[in-house]
Amino acid sequence: MRLLIRDVEKAMVEKPEEPIELAGWVYRIRELGGLNFVILRDRSGLIQLVVTEKPDLSLESVIAITGIPVRNEKAPGGIEIQVHSVNCISKADKDIPYRVNGDLSRIGLETVLDNRLLSVRNPAIQAIFKVQSTIIEAFSTYLRAQDFTEIRSSKLVGSGTEGGTALFAVEYFNKKLYLAQSPQFYKQTMVACGMERVFEVAQVYRAEKHDTPRHLNEYVSLDLEMAFIESEKDLIELEKAVLIHVFTEVLRKNSSELALHKATVPDAAAVERSPIISYEEALRIAIKESGNARLFDISPEVERLLCEWSMREYQSPLVFVNEFPRRHRPFYTYPLGDTLTMSFDTLFRGLEITSGSRRQHDYQAFIEALPRFGLKPEDMPGYLTLLKYGCPPHGGFAIGCERLTQKILGLSSVKEASLFPRDRKRTNP
Amino acid sequence: MRLLIRDVEKAMVEKPEEPIELAGWVYRIRELGGLNFVILRDRSGLIQLVVTEKPDLSLESVIAITGIPVRNEKAPGGIEIQVHSVNCISKADKDIPYRVNGDLSRIGLETVLDNRLLSVRNPAIQAIFKVQSTIIEAFSTYLRAQDFTEIRSSKLVGSGTEGGTALFAVEYFNKKLYLAQSPQFYKQTMVACGMERVFEVAQVYRAEKHDTPRHLNEYVSLDLEMAFIESEKDLIELEKAVLIHVFTEVLRKNSSELALHKATVPDAAAVERSPIISYEEALRIAIKESGNARLFDISPEVERLLCEWSMREYQSPLVFVNEFPRRHRPFYTYPLGDTLTMSFDTLFRGLEITSGSRRQHDYQAFIEALPRFGLKPEDMPGYLTLLKYGCPPHGGFAIGCERLTQKILGLSSVKEASLFPRDRKRTNP
């Protein structure tokens, strides 16, 4: 029976001197003093094999071995396997065009992504997606425990809900549809219809042309929407709780993945301490932090300044900015007075990871506000139906899954946190 | 503090005679002998309100009430609320174009779907998506417990992996991409790279023109792939375990939703008893069952016949059909002899819900087989990279989420199990 690498030590203690069977990928080969040291990789970790006979092995070949585990202080992890037999299950061609075990700090991001089918074999890169898997799980699990229902809404829509953003067109039989830029309308529909609390984890699409370390044209959005809230502050409280659960679970399940990236997650107290500041206050703080630079919006530079300020003043890597001006937020946002909104953004380690708001649930107020956004009621029959026949106060937010992954692990670009990223130039693999 | 309807009985027992607060949607209004009976709906259920003063209410309005819960055998559920005060939070317009509380057996599917934004307010329709939420959760939870990692792969691809099926084209900046018909290549990549066990729950797209109760052009696929299997029989065992967990969880969490549809789930023993028959055997059985009809393929009619046979002979609503001829399966399927494959389909209550197989992991054998499928190695550089540099034996399957939902609840069409279904004609809402 095949054993996983992570279970070798336990097997050794329970049945010392007994041969074990491992299977995995050849991660490294080194010859030293007549002995061959092979680092084997499986889904659970790495371990050193000592092979006396020179094996005909190539890097990344899949092998199964039997041998006796022994302690050796010099071996990585303190254990190595004295190998009896090696069976090559799938021999890797030696012309491999990418060094899987290469030093990632010396391999540029473009090379990593160009060779994605091979670079993702590297343990540190795989670690990114193990952490991402935990993020998705923790987000879902926390919300289910709060009585949220998971939904799956169509990604093929007749038009965008947000306005402003460019959309990708789809040839749908003899019609033109668009890839949804968010499940906004659908999640509001499900709340209005009485499901009250819904979440969705799915791809969304933005046909924006900028190619930056902050942007992807296809990304995974951790979306939620809930009824019977009073203001965006209820949503901020919920997001704090969601993030605490995500961080706790990543720490519990992915400590070795965090270690590979020398990363840490904030503890619950740090999340609780994070300040909520208004948009106006945020700009004032950023101007002061920057030494009186002329700042007019929550730009990437301002996001960084605010997080530095929060770290210094509150020992928290998070800042919630609320009360955005109405002109900065979509038409469905609930107003606060005449010029502001019950909205917020969440900044984490210098990057916006979340946008959320209470939504306008009043039919008359919705219709009256549309002209401010250059919209007409007849442009949005769906929203009219949603609001006209009984709709509770509600709101929601969306966390960018790749951005959260990036910032947890300290990655330099959001593209590193997408398995097969799509940007303006990258459409393959 | 607002109470959920499902918690009223508990509150009544713990604090009798104490007023409670409820909020929800007006589902039904009836006047009888000077009293007004209102059925209130919230995310947790329905309850009867008794209002003495004639309230100015319309169906589907959102209201908050206070009142005293009392036992009344004649009330649905045995409890009603003697209402003190009603506060209308969102008044529904009386011109509502769809009867939310109408008898679904008398409302045609087209009407239900045309009015999706309102029909989904009906408890029996919402129940479908609560069950679906549990299916997705149970699928994910079971696999995570088996050390599977959840992945999210791009839905924008350069070409299809399956071949044969039509694809929807996307205008991606100045390129033409396609909506992925399955995460097949990506999940195989992650297995080959050493993640070993992955799953993905995401939309897939088929640009097929047929418009039947079995087909959707956009559906949610419950996909998995795993390394180190010997044959499709390992996958069948895994699927049995997954389905047992799904059925158990649906029964545990959604008994009231099942009741609304008069539906039952198979027990573990029935799943365990389900037969595995070869493609050839399946045809033989179907021919016999049909009274010697001329049957040449696993058609919808054959799927029904085989499930009837299994129900009679094994008291199981499931049949696994394996060893499909090579010409019926995609190029990446692992052969069995010269003409068959290590593949299977799962039939449940008369419908194919799953397709799976061991995959060809041998680079040479893969290349040599391509001409049989009219393919050339240069057409699939991705697969060559995947297989050339160390790839373990592996396989996987995909369950159609809407089909599984449909068959659990006994729905007449798969479209009923899609929140916002997309078919040839239906692109809205």
Image (tube, coloured by chain):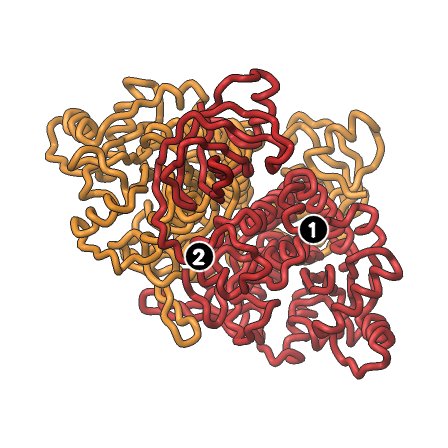
Chain colours: A orange, B red
The outermost residue toward the right is B313
The three-letter code of the residue at mark 2 reads Tyr
Q: Is residue A160 left or right of residue A197?
A: left
Task: State whether residue B68 appears in this view.
Answer: yes
Q: Is residue B161 above or below residue A196?
A: below
Q: Picture quarter containing residue B117?
A: bottom left
Foreground residue among B370 and B79: B79
SS label for mark 2: loop
Q: Picture quarter containing residue B249?
A: top right
Q: Position of residue B160 (x, y in %)?
A: 52, 69
Determine which residue is flagged by label 1.
B263
On whether disc 2 and disc 1 are found on a single subunit, the reply is yes
The outermost residue toward the front is B33
Q: Is residue A177 left or right of residue B211?
A: left
How far is disc 2 from disc 1 in space, using C-alphas? 26 Å
Q: Could you tell me which residue is drawn at 29 percent across and 34 percent down? A: A344
SS label for mark 1: loop
Q: Could you tell me which residue is drawn at 50 percent across and 66 percent down? A: B110
- Along the polypeptide, which appears first: circle 2 or circle 1? 2
Foreground residue among B419 and A348: B419
Q: Position of residue B199 (x, y in %)?
A: 60, 50
Foreground residue among B113 and B294: B113
Q: Is residue B410 above or below residue B267?
A: below
Q: Position of residue A356 (x, y in %)?
A: 33, 38
